[in-house]
Image (spheres, helix red, strand yellow):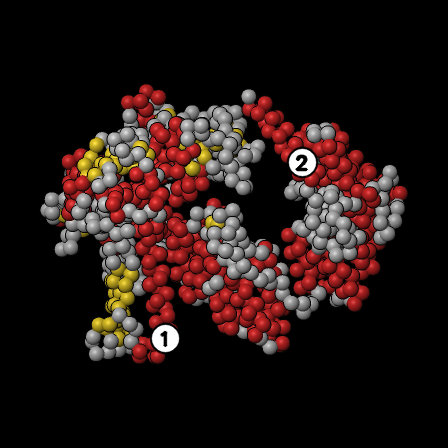
Amino acid sequence: MMAKRDIEMKKILANLLTLLFDHVEEPNNDDSSNTAPTHRNPDKEQVASSFPLPDPVNPDPELETLLDDFITEQTDMGADFGYYSNFSLKRSPLATAMSKFPSEKLTRLILLGAQRVRYLDQQLQELEDKAREEKLWYTCTDKPEYISLKKNRSYLHFLTRLLIRLRYSPEESDLISLIRWMCCLNKNDISNFRAPIPEVVGAIEKIIERDGLSPTLAAECRNLNVKLKQSRDPDSRNLEIYLASLLDTDDRVDIRPGEAWSDAVLADLNTMGPEERKKWNRFLLHCETLLKSQPDKKWIKKMQPLRHQIGSQPMMDLFKSWMAHYPKGRNNTKKGDPFEFSMSYLHHNIITGMLWACADQDSPDLCRFFATVAEQAYTSVRNIGPRSIKTGNACVQLLGQSRCNEALTLLTVLRTRVRAKPGLACIEKNLIPLARRMGIPEDEIDELAVPAYPLTHVGGASIPIGDCHAEISVDTNGKPQLSWINAKGKKQKSVPSEVKQEFSGELKELKASIGDLQKLIAAQKIRLDKLYMADKTWDYPTWKERYLDHPVVGIPARNCIWSFLGNSETFSGIHTEEGLMADFRGQPLPDSIATFQVALWHPMTDSNANIMGWRKWVEEREILQPFRQAHREIYILSDTEKKTITYSNRFAAQVVKQHQFNSLCGVRGWKNSLRLDVDNELPPPHLPIPHLNLRAEFTVEAAGEDTNDVGSFLYLSTDQVRFYPLNAPMRTGHSRGGEFRSVKGDEASPVKLSEIPEVIFSEVMRDIDLFVNVSSIGNDPTWFDRGPEDLRFHFWRAQSLGSLSEYGKIRLDLLTRIVPGLSIASRCSFSTDFLVVQGDLGTYKIHVGTGNVLKMPNEQFICIVKSGRLTKEKHPCFIPYEGDDILTLILSKALMLANDTAITDPTILSQINSRIE
C-alpha cells in the first residue's frame, strides 16, 4: 500500500515539475541580452556529436585515453560514491601516476577532465529533459544509462578536484589556462558541484604565497571574480569574497541595506573619512571570508593586523552598537511579513568574523555579549528557522574557549533557553569540556555553575558603591528590583548622581549582572522542574548549600516542597518566613532531618490527604511556586494499560497542531523532527532517560494533507506510548504516515509499563498530556467554522468538549476554590466538566479543558478568539503556579460573559444575539 502511494505521489510530482519547467521562465540577469532563457541549461546548443572543447582546451588523444582508462579502472573496482565521498589517491594506481605529471601536462589533464564533467552534466540534463517531456521524470534516475553517466561524472569530478588540491603546484601560465577555462563557463556551471572552484582558488593562494601576485595573474583573477559574482551558488559567492581578499582589493565591502543592523553599519561607514573607511572596508572584507563558524590560524593571523589598524576597543564598541540592532529584523518590510527577519548570507559571514575578531579580548562583559547574540541567533523565525546557526555556534564556541567564570554559567543558561537542535548540540559540545577545565563533574554542572553575584543572600543584596549602597531585591515573580541608599542614608529609586559621575564602570557592571540575574532565576525554575526526571537526592548539608541557602537558587527552591527521607520515616516540608522547614499544618520538622537524604517532593509519593493539605497551604498563603508541584498532575497505570502490558493508548487518536507540538517537545527535552510531505523516514518523538537506561516514545503521523509553504504538515494524529531500552534500535515511520518499524529489521522488545518507576511513568505521561492538551485542535474555536465536511471535524468536536484530562481535572479542582472568591461568584456554578456563567443576555458553559464556550439552552457554540486583552487582564484572585494559559483564559471569559451587556465586540455580540427568541 505504501509503495503504491509513493508511485502515485511520484507521478503527481512529475506532472507538477513538468508544468513548472514548461511554463516558468528563468529571469535573465545578463544586461547584454533581452531574451530570458527558458531552460535550466542554456548551453545545450554547445553540445555537438563529438566532445566539445572551448578555446583553452585543446584535444589530446593520449590524455583522453588516460581518462577513459581511469573510468574503466573505477568501474571494475565497483567504486560507488556520491558528491560528499572521501575519494583518495590510494584507490587508484592511475590517479597516483597522473599526480606525478609535470605542471603543463597535469594542467591539460585537469582541463580535459573538468570539461568532460561539464559535458556529462549536459548529457544527464538531456536525459532528464526527455523524461520530463514524456512525463516519466520520476523513473529517469533508475535507468542504466543515467546511472552509468552519473558514476562516470562522479569519478572524473573527484579526480580533477583531488589532483588540484593535493599535488598541483603549477606554473603561473598553466594556472592562468585553468582560470581562463573557468571564465568560459556560463553562470549555471559556476558552482562547486559542476567545477573545481574551491581547488582553483586554493591553487591561486598557493602561487601568490610562493611567487607573489603578478599583474597578469591579478587581471585574470579579477575576471574570475566577475564570473563568480554571477553564480547563483552561495558557496561560489563566498569564494569570490575570499579571492577578493587574496587580491587585496580596496573594493567596498558588500553589505546589503534593508536589515536594521546592516543599515546601522552603512550609516557609520558613510560618516567616516576616506582613510578610516578604507581600514574598515579591508577588515570587513576579511570578515566576509570566514565561511565556517570557527576560523583557522591563517585567518586569525591575517585578521590581527587589520584589527590593529582600527584598534581593538573602537572595533568592539562599534560592533556592539551595530549588534544592538540585530534583533530588530529588516527595515524594508512590514511587521508580520514572512521575511521580516531574513538575512543576507554574506552578513552571517561578517558577523561571525567580527565575533572571532573579539576572541582574545576575554572579559565578563564580552561573555555576556556573546551569550546575548547566541540566543538571538538561535531564535526561530517563521518560514526561516533559526536566524543564524553559524553565528550562534560561533558565540557558543567563543564562550567554550573563554577563561571567565561567567562563561560556564552563561552556557548553562543558554541550554535552558535555546530550542534549536544544532544549537543545543553545540552548547553540549562546548559546555562539558569547559566544566572539566574548571574541575566541575559533568553531573554537577547545573548545580555548581550557578553564581551568587550580584546577590549576597537569598533574594537580595546590599552592595556599596562609593558612599552609596545599591539595594537589590527579587519579587515573587523572580524579577530583580534595584533601589539605592544615598550618602545621606535616604532610600531612592533613581541612581545617585555621584554614582553616575564617579563609578560609571561599576554601575554598568551592576546593571549587566542584574540583567543576567533575571535570566538565571528563570533558568533555575526550569532546572528544578526537570529534577523529577533525573531522580536526584542529596545529603542534607549539600542540599542546604546548593539549594535552600544559595542566593540565587534559593529564590525558587524556598517555594518548593521537599521530601526528607530517613531510614524509617519520611517528612515533607517547605521553608517558612520564620526560616524553618514546616509541614502543611505549619508544624516545624524535627532536627533529625539534618541527617536525612533530601529529594524534591512529588505528589505521586504521598497520600491524597497530604496532597490536598499542601494545595490548601500554598493557596491560603499565596505561595507562587516556580512550577506546578502541589497542583501537579499525576498519572497512575490504568487497568487498560495493565492489560496491554507494553504500550498505552491513553493519548491515541488525538489531532494536534504539528508546529505547536514540536515546540512543546523542545521545551520538555523531547527529540522530534517536523513531518514534511517528502519521501523520508523519521523516528517517533522520543525522550532519553539515561540514568534508567530507558527511552520513551510517542508515535505520531501526519493527519490530513494540509501543509505550509515549505511542505510541513499542519496537523498530526497521535498513537501509542512505549518505553524501550535506551540503546535499542530506533523504530522509524514514513514522514507521510504508516507503520513504525525497525530500520535494521530486528525489532526491539518494549519494556513492560509495570516495570517503569512510578514517578518516571507519571512525568512522561504528563509531558505527553501537555503536548496533546495544549496543541490540540480542540483548543481552537475557529475550527467550528469548518463544519462537518472537514474529515477532522469530529476529532475537534470530541476534543473541544470531551472528558477532562489530568490537566483539566487539576484546573477544575482549583477553579472550585478560586471562583467563590470572585466578584461574579453568585453568577457562577459548576456542571460536570463546565464552569456555568449566568449573564444578562444568556447562560454560558465554559469547558474547563479547552476554554470553549457554549450558550444555553441549545448549546450554541460561541467563538471567542484569544486576544492580548483577554490573557493579560489581571484577575482579582491568586493562582499558585505559572504557565496555565487556559486557566487564565477561562477566568477572562467568565468575567466578560457575566457582564455580557458590556460586551462591545460585534462578532461576539452577533453570536450571542443570533438565537435569542
Question: Seen in the image, is 195 located left or right of residue 678?
Answer: right
For label 1, count other residues whose C-alpha is less than 10 Å away and answer few (under 14), some (14-19) or many (20+).
Answer: few
Tell me if residue 893 comes above or below residue 274 in the rendering. above
Residue 656 percent location from the top left of the image = 41, 35
Mark 1 secondary-structure assignment: helix
Kindly tell me whether residue 48 is visible in this rendering: yes
Amino acid at circle 2: Leu
Q: Is residue 250 above or below residue 754?
A: below
Residue sitting at x 30%, y 73%: 495
Per the image, label 2 sits on a secondary structure element best described as: helix
- Image quarter of residue 634: top left
Q: Which residue is at a point 72% across and 51% down the rendered structure image?
A: 28
Kindly identify which numbered label has been placed on residue 19. Answer: 2
Which image quarter holds the C terminus?
Answer: top left
Q: Residue 809 at x, y = what percent?
A: 25, 35
Local packing at callout 2 (Cα closer than 10 Å; few below 14, some 14-19, many 20+) is some
| Residue nearest the viewer, comparing 61 with 475 | 475
> Mark 2 or mark 1: which is in front?
2
Q: Position of residue 738 (x, y in %)?
A: 50, 26
What is the three-letter code of the residue carrying label 1?
Answer: Ser
In the picture of the structure, the residue carrying the numbered disc 1 is 504
Mark 2 and mark 1: Cα distance apart in space = 66 Å
Tell me residue 754's x, y (percent). 31, 26
